[in-house]
Image: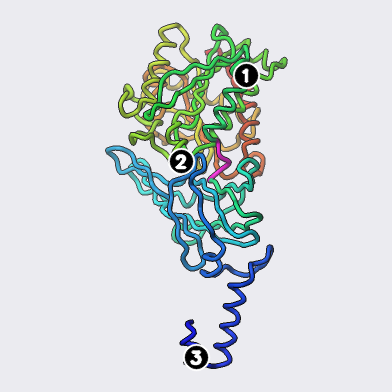
Amino acid sequence: MSLRGFRQRRGPAALLRLIVIFIQLAVPVAEGSQLKPTTMDAHAALDFIDTSIENASPLWYDVADGVVRIHLIYDHERASPNRAAGHVHFLLNARPGTKLTLEFLNLDNVWNGQPGSVAGELKTMAISDDGHVWKTVPTESLPGNRVQLPVEMRGPALYVARMEPYRLSDLARLLESIRSHPLARITTIGKTAEGRDLEIVRIGNPAAPYRVFVRARAHPWEAGSNWVAEGLIRRLLRDDADAKRFLRLYSVTVLPMANKDGVARGRTRFNLRGRDLNRNWDKPADPELAPENAVLERWLEGEIAAGRRPHLALELHNDGNGRLHVSRPPVPQLERHLARMAIFEELLRSKTWFTEGSTNAAFRNSGTLGDGWLERYGIDAAVHEFNCNWIAGLKEYTSSRHWKDYGANLAEVFHDYFDRVKP
Ligand SMILES: [Zn+2]
């Protein structure tokens, strides 16, 4: 209401309302207050949303009806209707002690050519005061594929992320900490579309009887897959009796961050040239459009030529379900492969917190690394998703600690798999 309107109406109710508005503007909302944020509150409380931080998502924002609306930006697949948004990572600057409601917009993804809102999967977010110690908290679902996150500012800044982030600096720290370890060997196999080095980490002796290949982070929003890979690497380098026992039987090669450019730029799914790095594995990779896959393919073919074909390959991802995606391309050895994967799943259930189960015979997702490597190279390969919201086997929210534990326990799964299957 304007002052002129007040003068025109001059009633005691109008005077009271003017006083209330004045108090709302002048008094910061106290911590723990139940006052529902209004447009005025959110405008006054919000200072800035900082997307200059590492791995920040591209976005723009505004305030409407008391809600801070985060407009995520889609990334797109080349020559395809597919698009994706859903990576979230930014630094909220707002007045300490205020409560804000954030709403995430542009969740209408297109997946395998079909409309697929990511709203139903967006059940949690991770928040942090310092960007290092994170807490996973639930979001609120509203009708019409809307998702909100209520937050309370304990200080002047709050990091908000889709899940606990794993940044290029986290990878650099890992690589630096293992570089001089006698059992680790880091090799640069080529460059990403934007010229970043792609490192492969080998742990153990390649002359050990069996070899595992693990790739993580083909999709940039799926940070959990990176924490699992780190947990595996660190477990095998712990230099205890179990690690020695595991590495007598197998060596492991890890490509920890396949889509480095996407992680650097806070993208959701595709590489910088519009390719999905977990597609098109049914044919040779395009070195122009998917250099990240082309250099990996060249590395793999070199390993095979040198008599070091991996016996098992795992492609690590995050989604809202967390299942093991069993490959079923039309290959003569499919029954043998399915029997091996059944043993692998049984070991996951007994040695880790895995309870989510595997995809059935009706499920096909052609062109994944799992399908492609089985079909083209005869490697027992699968995609392993991790539920980004909830760990059913622990009845807990996700965290880097739980994912690293999972990676650590994979070391024993691999050992027992080779011990039983002897592929
Ligand atoms: Zn994925």
The residue tagged 2 is 266
Q: How is the image coloured?
A: rainbow
* Disc on the earlier residue, 1 or 3: 3
**Residue 163 in magenta stretch:** yes
| Type of the residue with mark 1 | Asp
- Main SS class of the magenta portion in the image: loop
Q: Nearer the viewer, mark 2 or mark 3?
A: 3
Question: In the displayed structure, does residue 226 sit left or right of residue 241?
Answer: left
Q: CA distance from mark 1 to mark 2?
A: 37 Å
Q: Residue at x 59, y 69 (%)?
A: 36
Instruction: Mark 1: give few (<14), some (14-19) or many (20+) Cα within 10 Å.
Output: some
Query: Is-magenta flag for residue 117?
Result: no
> Which residue bears the numbered disc 1?
416
Judge by depth and name the residue closer to the eye, 225 or 121: 225
Provide the secondary structure element on which disc 3 rests. Answer: helix
Range of residues picked out in magenta: 162-166
Q: Which residue is mark 3?
A: 7
Q: Residue at x 57, y 67 (%)?
A: 37
The amino acid type of the residue labelled 3 equals Arg
In the image, what residue occupies the spot 52% across and 32% down?
168
Question: Which label sits in the foreground, 1 or 3?
Answer: 3
Which residue is situated farthest in the left direction here? 79
Q: Does 412 sit above or below residue 276?
A: above
